[in-house]
Image (cartoon, rainbow, N blue to C red):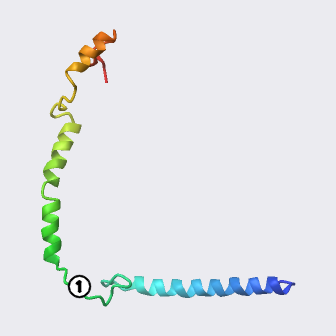
Amino acid sequence: MADSPIERQHQREREQERQRLREQEEKDLEVESRREPRPLEGFAGGHTTWTGQQDDEAAARVHARDAEESWKASERQARLEPEPDQRDPDIDEQARLRGEEPVSHREE
């Protein structure tokens, strides 16, 4: 073991920490071995007036168009429909004035 009192103290502290971690791991394994709903820590006994119906209503509003928008994005990505033209019509003219190739003729 350690020779100096400080080293012995450090050794004792390390051993206590290892023991604490072992005990904590045993508690974790015990909890994980049971399959049951577990409340959030700190909120286990808290009362709330929030209902599941409120969750459903909020989700219906927030995510109402998700499937449709996702499908549209997938179609655009797969090039099943052309990308919407977002070019400014004056860009080609500006490029010509600078002596450059028109933007609409450039490969992307």
Asked if residue 20 lies left or right of residue 57, the reply is: right
User: x, y (%) of residue 39?
Assistant: 32, 84
Type of amino acid at the residue the image marks with label 1: Thr
| Residue 1 visible | no
The residue under the point 17% across, 65% down is: 59
| Residue 56 visible | yes
The residue under the point 18% across, 28% down is: 85
User: x, y (%) of residue 24?
Assistant: 53, 85
Q: Quadrant of residue 104?
A: top left
The residue under the point 30% across, 15% down is: 95
Residue at the right extreme of this rendering? 3
Q: Nearer the viewer, residue 76 or 58?
A: 58
Q: Is residue 96 above or below residue 51?
A: above
Q: Which residue corresponds to mark 1?
A: 48
What is the crowding at mark 1: few (fewer than 14 residues within 10 Å), some, or many (at least 20)?
few
Say how many tags the image has.
1
The residue under the point 75% across, 83% down is: 10
Q: Is residue 74 above or below residue 28?
A: above
